[in-house]
Amino acid sequence: MAVYQHTYQQYSGPSTPLWSRFLIIPRYAYKSVFQSKLFTGLFAVCFAPLLLMTILIYLKHNISVLEAFNARVSDIGFDVNGFFFRIFTSLQTSLGFLLTVIIGPTLISRDLSNNALPLYLCRPLSRADYVIGKMSVIMILLSLITWVPLLILFVFQAYLEGGSWLWDNLYVARAVFVISWTWIIILALLATALSGWLKWRIAASGALFAVFVVPTPITIIINEMFRSNVGTLLHPGFLMNMLMDKLFRMENTFTPDWMVPPTWSMWASLATLALICVGLLSLKVRAYEVVK
């Protein structure tokens, strides 16, 4: 049938809800992400600490298994408490950083290099939907290895230990949730912002590492020279560790007390970093780019 003989009419089928349209981006992104054997292997390795954590919690409450190895509960030299969950939360967030380094640099750079943004934005998808969709590629994956399994294990521990343990350790669940989501949002914003401005993958990955490595000597020099904690506010990695210690109600594990800034200033510093990333994305994510 010739083209002119077709009768065209408006699409009358079901429409995707507005709130979930951004999810189409991670849906297709995962098809290419998991084609990489390196990424798939690393993603599988991320569940090894969680498996170890599950075994330790189980052994702590299963006397019969311990008796088979001629061991007693008192012989196990650890308690399932805030320190226990803090160690594994720190480990899982670190593994999440490695995943972000692998998949983050190409999230937006490929679209910009191939002039694909107009194809996205000419559809019922706003700039915010596009950015959130790209960030969701990281946010969903990191959620699967951080707060989701850690909170499940927290409930598992509470089930084995009893209601009193749950009530006394609710702060642990709150700490896991807040720290995980703070880390996920910061990494997702940094990765997408750097991906938009640095189209070369190696450069974007190096810049992501540099954000957490380069400020280290600067932080130490400023703090030592002025005997203050101002330099600490320039290091997002230090801030995350200090906030983790505070939320898990622990002593500072990495820095002396005089280098620890007030809690509100640490949150303000991370919020400022997030706003800078949002500003960079708003400048770069456009349907058309004018090149002079």
Image (cartoon, rainbow, N blue to C red):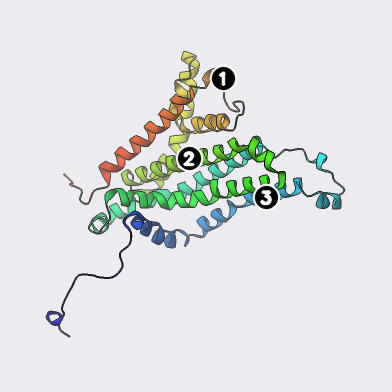
Q: Position of residue 288 (x, y in %)?
A: 20, 51
User: Is residue 75 toward the left or the right of residue 291 in the image?
Assistant: right
Residue tagged 2: 183
Front-lying residue, 236 or 146: 146
Residue depth check, mark 3 versus mark 1: number of the one nearer the observer: 3
What amino acid type is highlighted by mark number 1?
Asp
Q: Of the residues under marks 3 and 2, which one precedes in the sequence?
A: 3
Name the residue: 83% across, 52% down.
Answer: 64
Residue furthest left in the image:
4
For residue 267, above or below residue 154: above
Mark 1 lies on residue: 257
- Mark carried by residue 63: none
Which of the two labelled residues, at mark 2 and mark 1, occupies the earlier sequence position? 2
Give the residue at mark 3.
54
Q: Give the distance between the C-alpha atoms of the residues marked 3 and 2, in whole angstroms.
A: 23 Å
Report how far apart the C-alphas of labels 3 and 1 lie in the structure: 34 Å
Task: For label 1, count other residues whose C-alpha is less than 10 Å away and answer few (under 14), some (14-19) or many (20+).
Answer: few
Image quadrant assignment for residue 13: bottom left
Assign the N terminus to one quadrant of the image.
Answer: bottom left
